Image: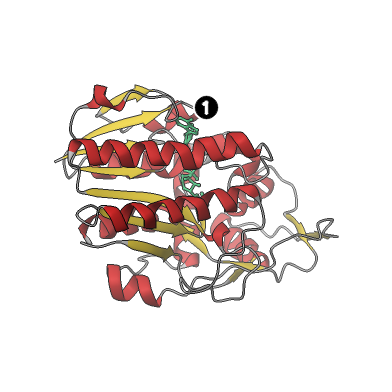
Amino acid sequence: MRFLVTGASGFIGSNLAVSLQEKGEVLGLCNLAPGSMENLKGFKGEFIRGDICAFDYSLLGKVDAIFHQAAITDTTVTDQKLMLSTNVDAFQKILDYALKIGCKKVVYASSAATYGKGKVPMSETDSPQPANIYGESKVKMEIAAREFSKKHPEISLVGLRYFNVYGPNETHKDKAASMVYQLYLQIVSGRSPRIFKWGDQYRDFIYVKDVVLANLKAFEFDGNGAFNVGTGVPTTFNQVIQVLNAALGTHKPTEYFDNPYNFYQEKTQADMTLSKKTLGFTCQFSPESGIRDYVQNLKRTGVPV
Ligand SMILES: NC(=O)c1ccc[n+]([C@@H]2O[C@H](COP(=O)([O-])OP(=O)(O)OC[C@H]3O[C@@H](n4cnc5c(N)ncnc54)[C@H](O)[C@@H]3O)[C@@H](O)[C@H]2O)c1
C-alpha cells in the first residue's frame, strides 16, 4: 500500500504519517510551517516540501489512499481569500488528483467548527452554523465532497469532523495549540492556570492517538460521508486543570478572569452515535487517561517552556 498524507509535518498529520508506516509506504507533503520539522523524527517515508495550492501531483505517481490534513488551522485568520484557496480549492485539486490516478480512498479533515454555536451534543444531522471563515471553509469542503461523491461514487470519500484535539507534536501551533497544552505550559512554568470565569465552559477534548484511530477506521470504511470525531464526553476547563495538577503532582490554584469575547463558543460535545455505528469508531482514551498519557509524553520529551 502507498499512502499520501498532506500536512504531514503538522500536529495530526505527523502522528498519522508515523502510524501509517505500519501499513505501507508513506509519502508526506507539507509546506513546513515553522517549527514543525521536529514532528517528523519518527518518520521514515519520503517527505516532500510543497504547497498544496500549487503542487504538481503528477510528480507523486499513484497512491492507494490519501489522508488530507493540510489546512490553515488558525481559526483567528480573517483573510477569506487565503483561507478558501488553501482549505477549499486545494482540496478540490486533491480530489481531481485522486480521480486521475484511480485512487479509491480519500479521508479528509473537517472540523467541529462546522457546528459553530449549535446545540449540544452536536450531531451530523444538525445544520451547519460556522462562526468564522475557518468553519465556513470546512463546510465548503464538505459540500465539495458531497458533489464529488455524487459524480464519482466509486471513490470512498470520508470527512472527519475533529473536535478539540490535543497531544504530542502540537508545540509549533503556539497560541493555536490546544487548551490542554496551554494550561500545562502555565503550570510547569510555575504560573497559575488562567481561564475564563468560572471554568465551567466545556469542550469535547480528544486525544490525537484516537484521531489517528478514527482515520484508520475511515480508511477501512467502504462508503461516503462526514462523521464526528470526539469522545462524546464534555470536559470543563476546571476538570482539565484538575487532571493536569494530579498528573504533574502540583496544586496550582486557578486564576479566573472575565471573558472579553461575545462570540465565544461555550460548549462543544460530539454525538458519537453515527461514527460508532457506521465507522465502528470508539475512543480508546477517556479525557483523563488521554491527558495523563500526554503529560507523561511531555515529561519524557522535555518540551521547552
Ligand atoms: N487540532 C485540532 O483540534 C483540529 C480540530 C478540527 C479540525 N482540525 C483539522 O485537522 C487538520 C490538521 O490540523 P492540525 O491541528 O494538525 O494543524 P497543523 O497546523 O499542525 O497542521 C496543518 C499543516 O498543514 C500545513 N499547511 C498549511 N497550508 C499549507 C499549504 N498551502 N501547503 C502545504 N501544507 C500546508 C501546515 O504547514 C501544517 O503543518 C486540519 O485540516 C485542521 O483544520 C484540527
Q: Quadrant of the C terminus?
A: top right
Q: Nearer the viewer, residue 144 or 75?
A: 144
Residue 249 in picture, x, y percent from top left:
59, 57
Q: Say if 27 sits above or below 279 in the image.
A: above
- Kindly tell me whether mark 1's CB lies below 8 Å from ligand 1: no
Q: Nearer the viewer, residue 109 or 177?
A: 109
Residue 303 in view: no
Colour logic: secondary structure
- Residue 156 image-quadrant placement: bottom left
- Residue 229 image-quadrant placement: bottom left
Q: Nearer the viewer, residue 53 or 42?
A: 53
Furthest residue toward front: 151
The residue tagged 1 is: 35
Q: Which residue sits at x=41%, y=41%?
A: 91
Q: Which residue sits at x=44%, y=36%?
A: 90
Furthest residue toward left: 1
From the viewer's perspective, is 138 left or right of 203? Answer: left
Q: Say if 178 sits above or below 301 in the image.
A: below
Q: Which residue sits at x=27%, y=60%?
A: 217
